[in-house]
Image (cartoon, rainbow, N blue to C red):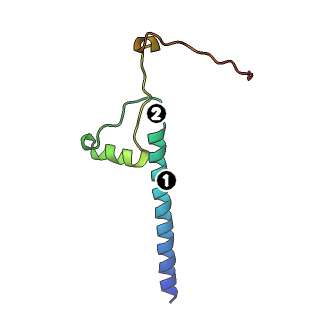
Amino acid sequence: MKKTRQRLLALLIAVVVGLGMLNVLAYNHAYAMMHFASGGSRTGRPEDLSLVAKLKVLFLGVNVPRPVSDRSPSDLSPDCQVLSIASGMA
């Protein structure tokens, strides 16, 4: 009876720890997908990644660098204007 309780308690602890780790992985993926990285290259397609790269993506999430453009708005549309809105805040 006592061994059964100990095994059930150990199983419960293992399940709780496992779910906690799964939540940490889910958080890392969600954060990585919703925030641009400060640099680096975009994560490649899954079928092109090595096993080590896949494990890195599994634990750290994907890398999505911030898009950069050297074109000005007037290059896209000649009638673009720069607008400023004054506010009472300093």
Residue 62 appears at what percent x and percent y? 39, 41
Q: Is 87 displayed left or right of 84 in the figure?
A: right
Specify the quadrant that holds the C terminus: top right
Picture residue at 50% right of the left edge, 66% below the top: 16
Asked if marks 1 and 2 touch (Cβ < 8 Å), the reply is no
Where disc 1 sits, the SS reads: helix
Q: Is 10 drawn above or below residue 68 in the view shown?
A: below
Identity of the residue furthest to the bottom in this view: 1
Task: Identify the residue under disc 1.
Answer: 24
Residue 1 appears at what percent x and percent y? 50, 90
Task: Identify the residue under disc 2.
Answer: 37
Picture residue at 47% right of the left edge, 34% below the top: 36
Q: Is 56 drawn above or below residue 83 in the view shown?
A: below
Q: Amino acid at mark 1?
A: Val
Quarter of the rendering containing residue 42: top left
Counting residues from the start of the chain, the first of labels 1 and 2 encountered is 1
Where disc 2 sits, the SS reads: loop
